[in-house]
Amino acid sequence: MYQGKRWEFVRSNIEGAIASKRFRPGEKLPNDVDLALEYGVNRHTVRYAIRALEQEGLLRVEQGRGTFVVEHPTPYLLSPQTRLTDNLISQGRLARRKILSAATIKADARLAGYLDLRARDDVLRIDTLSYQDEIPIVIAHSYFPAGRTPGLLDKFSGANSISTALRRIGIDDYSQQWVTISARLPSPQEARLLGMSTSAPVFVKESLDCSGRIPIKFGENILCAPRISFRFDFKDLSSAEQSPALRARSGKAQASKSKSSASKD
């Protein structure tokens, strides 16, 4: 029989359940009544234990919603070369990716513009779900110009990484040319895949990868916001600004601006 205070007994058991992954990061705990029945105590004892764990930073109490295990965000380095899988592996986090679906589609105006294609050209779309320590973290929609990435889907199987699959078809040198990040609430399907509430936000990260000046991938990633913190490497970004592709883009933008100014004059 436990000899200490009852609330300490409850706190210890909840801590153990979190450590053993019975209660996973972001997961909602059973309500006070169920926990009281499980541990053979009253509801006030459970609440006292929960307050203590909240003060320790292990639990988060949301009014009207319940009690949740706190999620510690994974740092996501944003630089021209770094990929999500590389981020997780470099931190010693188990990373795996599951293919949700793959299909060849026709480029609409948006994809054609990003990938420098004609409307209705073939585009390979691969949808994946990535995990960190077996916790779902990112839904990725990746679009590849089919004519520039032949055989990519076959090479992706078992690769666990897009960069590995691209290397297998001979594309070794590519980098992110731009990234945009916005936030919104997830759709019911996105929330289900990510194991999160529809009231918690997601980040939407869009990016374009190029090999030299040739677009090879447009990506739209849906990231569980409580599980991610973005970090920018300005040193890498400064180096990227000197790349031929970005210099060319900057030159075109400057020329367009000068032309516009001249026409106003």
Image (tube, grey):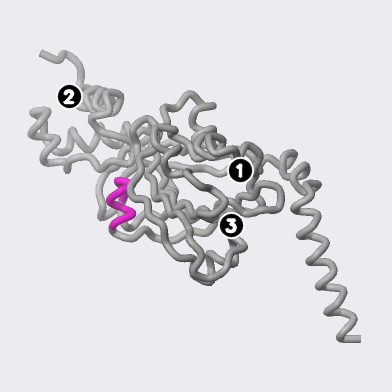
Query: Which quadrant holds the C terminus?
Result: bottom right
Q: Is mark 3 in CB contact (under 8 Å) with mark 1?
A: no
Q: CA distance from mark 3 to mark 2?
A: 50 Å
Q: Which residue is mark 2?
A: 6
Give neighbour class at mark 2: few <14, some 14-19, many 20+ (Cα, 10 Å). Answer: some
Q: Is residue 13 visible?
A: yes
Q: Which mark is residue 185?
A: none
Q: Earlier in the sequence, mark 3 or mark 1?
A: 1
Distance CA(mark 1)–CA(mark 2): 47 Å
Q: CA distance from mark 3 to mark 1?
A: 11 Å
Camera-near label (3 vs 2) is: 3
**Residue beneath disc 1:** 78
What percent of the width, then of the height, locates residue 178?
Answer: 64, 54
Could you say where residue 40 lies in the image, as x and y percent from the top left? 8, 28
Give percent across and percent down for residue 28: 25, 43
| Residue 192 vs residue 50, the one in the foreground | 192
**What residue do we see at 39% from left, 36% from top?**
157
Label 3 Cα neighbours within 10 Å, binned few <14 / some 14-19 / many ≥20 = few
Residue type at mark 2 is Arg
Q: Is residue 246 left or right of residue 161?
A: right
Q: Is residue 193 magenta?
A: yes
Name which residue lies at 40% across and 40% down.
Answer: 130
Horizontal side of residue 35 vs 110, given as left or right: left
Residue at 32% x, 32% y is 53
Q: Tell me whether circle 1 and circle 2 mark residues in contact (CB < 8 Å).
A: no
First to last magenta residue range: 189-196
Give the main secondary structure of the magenta stretch.
helix
Q: Please give the residue where the numbered disc 3 appears in the rendered image.
A: 180
As for residue 122 lying within the magenta part, the answer is: no
